[in-house]
Structure formats: structure tokens, C-alpha cells
Amino acid sequence: MSAVRMNSKKYLSKYQGRRTHPIIWCAAIICAVLAVAVIITGIAVCVGYIIIHPRIPSISVLSATLDTFRYNEAGLLVTQITMDIRATNDNRKAHASFQDTSMLLVFGGMEVARLVAPPFEVERNGTTDLHYVVESRAIPLEQEQMELASLSLRRDEVLFVLRGRFRAQWRVGLLGSVKFWCYLNCRLRFRLNGTFTNTNRCSSRPQ
């Protein structure tokens, strides 16, 4: 009985004599500090975005004119459109940049022209306009497109589709930068006299 008690005392004495290594304490303190810092940063970012309420920049068709739309019996189409695209940054506290801007002008499923723009920036709560003169050479049409062109001439209305995408990025102070891919897909309606007859706004959407 006394031997058992003696062994227990030796075991407890040996266990109590062990101390946590300083490196482990330092690692634990560093992890705790990092965890607190991450929590504080997350709260600051959430509060900052709630207060600032940043909006995603957009592009939209400001104006357009159908300058030329000619179609002959040989099935060749010649067209020219003058178009102004507006890039808008509604953020009052965030500078925005637009990159990889590319748009396609389509008639009857056929690509008429490609519209591109180099990277550019838009000031806080500002706009930047891009001017395009989209001119195509004689484009050979397939049977379905020829019928669509003939129908357009009879109805005195021409329909184009504008598809595009761009990458928008803006930075809000110390909260960091945000990037979004935005896409454009809308119909452009014209009278043969060149009048742009769209009733709905043609504007990009984030995705």
C-alpha cells in the first residue's frame, strides 16, 4: 500500500515539474493575436462597405445612329453605325477602372464588327464616353440572313444585337479592391432613316 502511494507521489511530482516550452507559448500568443486581427479586419470591412455602399460600375449605350444599311440582290450587306458608349462610376468614394472591354455587333446571328477599348479609368462619381464608328465592308449573307435583310427593308426597321463584356475594378480606401466581370446583351433597333428607336436602356449587368 505504501509502495503504491510512493509511486503516485513520484508521478505527480514528475508531471508537475514539466513546463510548457516558451516557443509553444509564443506560437499560441501569435495565433491569438492573428485571430483577433482577422476578426477586427472583417468587422471593419463589413462596416465600411455598409457605410460606403459601393456600386458596380457599368457601361451603357448612350446614343446610336444607323448611317448606312444597304443590301443588294447579290446578297451583300454594307452597314455603318455611329455609337457612343458611356462608362459610369456611381461611387462617390471609389475610383474605378475598366479592363478587357470587348463588344460584338451582330446582325441575324452574324458578326458585323468587334468593338474594343484599351484599359481606362473613370473618376469618382463620373463618366467616360467611348465613341465608335462601326463600318463593315460588303458582307456576304446566307439565305436566312438575306430574308431578314429584305424583311428589315420592308418594315423600315433594322435589328442589331450588341454583346460584350468587361472587367470592372474599384478600390475603396483601405478596404481593398473589388473586381467584377460585367456583361452586355441587348437589342438595338433602328429606322432606315438612322433613328435609334430603343425604348429600354441598354446597360451591362454583373455576373
Image: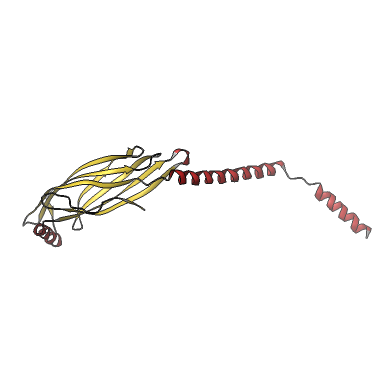
Q: How many marks?
A: 0
Q: On the rendered structure, is 78 left or right of 96?
A: left
Extreme-right residue of the structure = 2
Residue located 28% across and 39% down the image: 128
Q: Residue at x 32, y 45 (%)?
A: 100
Foreground of the two, 123 or 143: 123
The picture quadrant where one finds residue 156 is bottom left
The residue closer to the viewer here, 11 or 64, is 64
User: Where is residue 63 drawn, in percent x and y?
Assistant: 21, 46
Q: Is residue 46 left or right of residue 202?
A: right
Percent across and percent down for residue 55 are: 38, 46
What colour scheme does the image use? secondary structure
Q: Residue at x 26, y 49 (%)?
A: 103
Determine the residue positioned at 46% across, 46% down. Answer: 50
The residue closer to the viewer here, 191 or 153, is: 191
Give percent across and percent down for residue 72: 6, 55
Judge left or right: residue 146 versus residue 164. Answer: left
Image quadrant occupied by the N terminus? bottom right
User: Is residue 43 placed above or below 155 in the rendered structure?
Assistant: above
Residue 166 position, x and y percent, is 32, 47
